[in-house]
Image: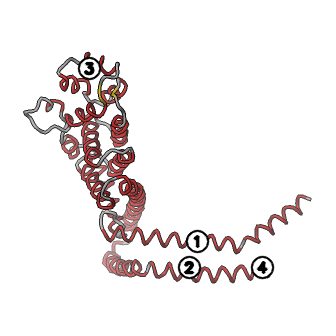
């Protein structure tokens, strides 16, 4: 019988795949057993609380669900960015790790989630911006947007604008106005740079006389100026994102989201910032890929079922 042969083949494939998956998860199983034992002991201690604890339990389950969702989202962002960093930055894997760590550091000093900083950096590096300027542009965008009260998405868009300008030969009026719209005093900074009036600078931009990269570096360096003696210091937003983080609801909520994500990553030992976490992500990828192959083979074994259904439909149609 075709069905019996199909089931026997699937059973054999399932047993083989199951053994591989079981071996891959042995170490995780041991960890979960120890966690389970600890949780059982904890449960015995609080069993007298009864129904009141059910409310807390529901809350814990909700928190865990949110944590795992955050972890999944962050790992996806991390993996995508690391591929770009490794391929585009000089220095390979180590340069990629350094870039990632620098972007996370910028995020921690702001009210914005790490995903926004990593995505912004990924966009810039993909455009061909080098490591040092990527860090400068993301930091400048972060502080400038924080000063204007913008969102993490605004930071990404500003960093993207910086990246596009860096690829141009000349800086035009529309480019500068997009920065001004986000609270960056770009015309004033350029007027100070060239020792002229803002109107004169606008005339230069309209005629395509402003060198794009030089002008962009002037603007971003002015935004990050920390020397109070510099004439550019009056335009500086250096460190402003960190100052605004502590006393804002946005910063507090983002800190909570970051805690959710970190908790889940550490619980599963899938934190991409650690060597063991990166190794486990690779192992998990391998296991999932093997399981996917198994499912494809299982589908092939049951291909005849589709033929049966097609024949049945034909008979009904007649």
Instruction: Identify the residue at horizontal 76%, vertical 70% (top origin).
Output: 305
Q: Nearer the viewer, mark 4 or mark 3?
A: 3
Say which residue label 3 marks: 201
Q: Residue 2 bears which disc, if any?
A: 4
**Label 3 packing within 10 angstroms: few (<14), some (14-19), many (20+):** many
Does 244 sit above or below residue 114? above
Q: Identify the residue under disc 1.
A: 293
Query: In x, y percent, where is residue 53?
Result: 36, 68
Numbered disc 3: secondary structure = helix
Of 20 and 308, nearer the camera is: 20
Callout 2 environment at 10 Å: few (<14), some (14 to 19), or many (20+)?
some
Q: Locate residue 274, reporting x and y percent.
A: 30, 66
Give the left or right position of residue 263, taking residue 287 as reference: left
Looking at marks 1 and 2 on the same chain, the residue that comes earlier in the sequence is marked by 2
Q: Earlier in the sequence, mark 2 or mark 3?
A: 2
Tag 1–tag 2 contact (CB < 8 Å): yes
| 226 vs 166, nearest the viewer | 166
Q: Tag on residue 17?
A: 2
């Amino acid at each position: 019988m075709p069905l019996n042969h199909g089931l026997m083949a699937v059973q054999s494939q399932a047993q083989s795949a199951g053994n591989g998956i079981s071996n891959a998860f042995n170490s995780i199983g041991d960890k979960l057993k120890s966690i389970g034992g600890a949780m059982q002991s904890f449960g015995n201690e609080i069993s007298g609380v009864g129904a009141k604890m059910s409310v807390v339990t529901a809350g814990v389950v909700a928190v865990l669900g949110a944590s795992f969702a955050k972890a999944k989202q962050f790992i996806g962002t991390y993996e995508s960015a690391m591929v770009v960093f490794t391929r585009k930055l000089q220095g390979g894997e180590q340069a990629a790790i350094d870039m990632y760590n620098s972007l996370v550091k910028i995020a921690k000093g702001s009210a914005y989630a790490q995903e926004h900083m990593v995505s912004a950096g990924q966009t810039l590096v993909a455009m061909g911006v080098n490591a040092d300027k990527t860090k400068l542009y993301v930091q400048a965008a972060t502080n400038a947007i924080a000063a204007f009260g913008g969102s993490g998405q605004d930071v990404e868009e500003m960093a993207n604008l910086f990246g596009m300008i860096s690829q141009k030969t000349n800086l035009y009026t529309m480019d500068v106005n997009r920065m001004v719209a986000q609270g960056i005093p770009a015309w004033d900074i350029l007027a100070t740079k060239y020792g002229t009036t803002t109107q004169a600078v606008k005339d230069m931009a309209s005629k395509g006389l402003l060198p794009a990269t030089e002008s962009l570096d002037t603007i971003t360096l002015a935004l990050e100026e920390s020397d109070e003696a510099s004439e550019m210091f009056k335009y500086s937003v250096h460190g402003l994102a960190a100052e605004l983080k502590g006393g804002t609801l946005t910063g507090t909520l983002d800190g909570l989201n970051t805690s959710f994500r970190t908790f889940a990553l550490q619980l599963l030992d899938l934190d991409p910032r650690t060597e063991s976490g990166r190794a486990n992500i690779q192992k998990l990828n391998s296991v999932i890929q093997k399981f996917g192959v198994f499912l494809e083979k299982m589908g092939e074994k049951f291909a005849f079922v589709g033929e049966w259904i097609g024949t049945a439909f034909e008979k009904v149609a007649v």
